[in-house]
């Protein structure tokens, strides 16, 4: 039987540490009282916390979302008694004074005829922001012993707010089959908790250091080139020159700094006046614009003087031998998108593609980035693609030696289109490496492959409407060491008939090795028609730590 796995990424105002993981099947409720829980509640400075709300629930209590025991208030001296049966209770206290809230949790073991009075001090409240990789839409998150019942959104995101400091059991799933992870609140940590039937694992990801503005230092460009993996190895960008045969040789490039967010500007021709006396106007490329730098002849390293939104009023058709480098800046490219056309030796680094000019869901919509017509040696790294209605990035019409790495694909129908359907064109001669990318919340597929050779490794797929990877139309897909939080990890057909049966002529060839399935699904059997990438690359071990790194570090740095 397949074990169910529930994962939480915990980003806390206060959270760290983990001890134990257990199944807990108790959902406790109130009964007739025989003894009393007696408490003296104090503010942080030790003064009595008068008229503070207090509630005691059994430590095994798990909320079902319904109303539970009413709060009781302390008296003017901060004292309160709560009738209860003998047992172990979690007591929560909450105080609001002049719009400032504080609270505390306290474990109280109540014996028969107990007479002791415990002192509880209030402190600052915190919150838990988390992410659950869920395959079950009914999954809820609870805090044992407290009235906390949270349903994650469609991407698995949740927030538990107004939590006092203390040690908590975070409970996942139905109370009859619950997994729990105990966490101790400490300010400022991010944890990734994996809890299975019998064990727990916690990962604290490394701090993702922000990139620095390269300032035209060519050693910084060299450092960037050293990070290229997969099919795009050999790409030099602004440090290379492509000859007529497609060979790339080292060359001394020019540096072009983008100094304005303008794209085109309107220029009046005072020598030409129409019958109404108005001057003739012409749209010209704005000096110092992204378009101005991108259209330079020869190798060009494009860097940005300032962060900003660069709205393309027409498609930006790139020439060869360019590095568009947004490191150290927040660069947002909107409007009509970027296209290559028989272009080679291109690098796109640290960019966000968002808010397209065309928002209709049809095939005329521009992609954020379109790599087509036998473009080759293209590297897309640490970019974010969002809001494009149909497809965010495409690699098609014989484009090859392309790598997409450490990038995010969200809020679209499909993340990447690799090739065109076979009824449009046969595309066997195309190559794409995909690694350490994050795909989430797409209404259809993460990657849709039609023909060619696709190597997908160390990617993270979450909550996709159809397949994480569709491998059809004779595509050869080598899929290894990915994390799939999706019920349909890989599909090997690109078309189905009216009865839902796959169309045999649209079959693809898939080899799957070492992947991790967290929401159903399983590996397809096959050898990708004998295809296996012939380059050397370091493959990360699949697991929680890898998933955390991808979710946190994919996209601009």
Image (cartoon, rainbow, N blue to C red):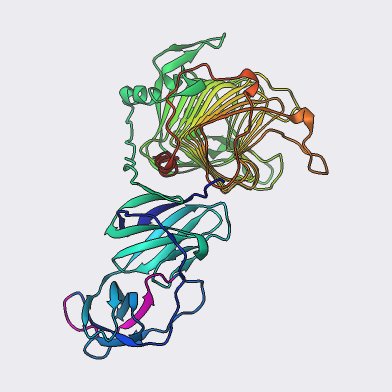
Q: Is residue 106 or residue 492 the one in the foreground?
A: 106
In the image, farthest residue toward the top? 245
> Eyeballing the image, is 516 above or below 465?
above
Q: Which residue is drawn at 58% across and 20% down?
A: 400
Q: Is 547 located above or below residue 433 in the figure?
A: below
Question: Residue 166: x and y, percent?
Answer: 29, 65
Whether residue 51 can be seen here? no
Q: Is residue 36 above or below residue 459?
A: below
Q: In which quarter of the image is residue 167?
A: bottom left
Residue 94 located within the stretch drawn in magenta: no
For image coordinates 44% across by 16% down, the residue present is 240
Q: Nearer the viewer, residue 463 or 167?
A: 167
Picture coordinates of residue 383, whole percent (x, y): 47, 37
Report how many numbered discs are placed on residues in the image. Answer: 0
Q: In this view, does 381 lie to the left or right of 56?
A: right
In the displayed image of the protein, which residue is found farthest to the right?
A: 498
Residues in magenta? 45-61
Say left or right for 439 vs 99.
right
Quarter of image, res 253: top left
């Amino acid at each position: 039987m397949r074990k169910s796995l529930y994962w939480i990424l915990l980003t806390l105002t206060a959270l760290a540490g983990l001890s134990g993981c257990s199944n807990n099947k108790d959902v406790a409720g109130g009964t007739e009282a025989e003894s009393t829980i007696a408490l003296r509640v104090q503010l942080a400075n030790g003064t009595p916390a008068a008229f503070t709300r207090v509630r005691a629930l059994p430590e095994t209590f798990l909320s079902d979302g319904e109303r539970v025991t009413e709060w009781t208030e302390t008296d003017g001296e901060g004292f309160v008694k709560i009738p209860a049966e003998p047992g172990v209770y979690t007591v929560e206290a909450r105080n609001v004074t002049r719009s400032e809230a504080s609270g505390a949790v306290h474990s109280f073991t109540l014996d028969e005829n107990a007479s002791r009075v415990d002192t509880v001090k209030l402190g600052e409240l915190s919150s838990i922001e988390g992410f659950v990789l869920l395959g079950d839409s009914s999954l809820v998150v609870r805090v044992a012993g407290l009235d906390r019942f949270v349903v994650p959104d469609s991407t698995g995101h949740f927030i538990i707010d107004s939590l006092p400091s203390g040690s908590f059991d975070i409970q996942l799933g139905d109370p009859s089959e619950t997994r729990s992870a105990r966490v101790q609140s400490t300010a400022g940590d991010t944890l990734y908790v994996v809890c299975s039937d019998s064990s727990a694992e916690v990962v604290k990801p490394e701090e993702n250091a922000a990139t620095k503005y390269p300032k035209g230092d060519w050693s910084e460009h060299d450092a960037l080139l050293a990070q290229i993996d997969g099919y795009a190895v050999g790409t030099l960008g602004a440090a290379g020159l492509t000859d007529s045969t497609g060979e790339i040789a080292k060359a001394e490039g020019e540096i072009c700094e983008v100094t304005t967010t303008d794209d085109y500007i309107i220029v009046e021709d005072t020598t030409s006046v129409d019958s109404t006396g108005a001057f003739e106007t012409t749209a010209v490329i704005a000096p110092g614009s992204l378009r101005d730098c991108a259209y330079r002849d020869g190798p060009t390293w494009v860097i940005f003087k300032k962060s900003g939104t660069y709205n393309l009023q027409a498609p930006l058709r790139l020439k060869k031998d360019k590095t568009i480098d947004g490191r150290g800046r927040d660069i947002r490219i909107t409007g009509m998108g970027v296209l290559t056309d028989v272009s080679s030796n291109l690098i796109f680094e640290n960019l966000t593609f968002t808010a397209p000019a065309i928002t209709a869901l049809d095939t005329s919509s521009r992609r954020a980035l379109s790599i087509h017509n036998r473009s080759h040696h293209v590297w897309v790294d640490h970019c974010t693609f969002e809001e494009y209605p149909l497809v965010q990035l495409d690699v098609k019409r014989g484009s090859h030696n392309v790598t997409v790495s450490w990038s995010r694909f969200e809020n679209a129908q499909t993340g990447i289109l690799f090739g065109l359907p076979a009824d449009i064109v046969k595309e066997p001669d195309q190559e794409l490496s995909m690694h350490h990318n994050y795909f989430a919340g797409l209404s259809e597929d993460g990657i849709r492959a039609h023909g060619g050779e696709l190597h997908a490794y160390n990617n993270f797929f979450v909550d996709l409407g159809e397949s994480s990877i569709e491998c059809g139309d004779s595509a050869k897909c080598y899929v290894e060491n990915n994390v799939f939080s999706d019920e349909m990890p890989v599909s090997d057909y690109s078309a189905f008939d009216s009865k839902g049966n796959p169309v045999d002529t649209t079959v693809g060839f898939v080899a799957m090795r070492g992947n991790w399935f967290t929401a159903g699904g399983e590996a397809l059997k096959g050898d990708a028609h004998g295809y296996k990438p012939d380059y050397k690359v370091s493959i990360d071990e699949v697991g929680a730590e890898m998933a955390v790194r991808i979710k946190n570090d994919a996209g601009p740095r």
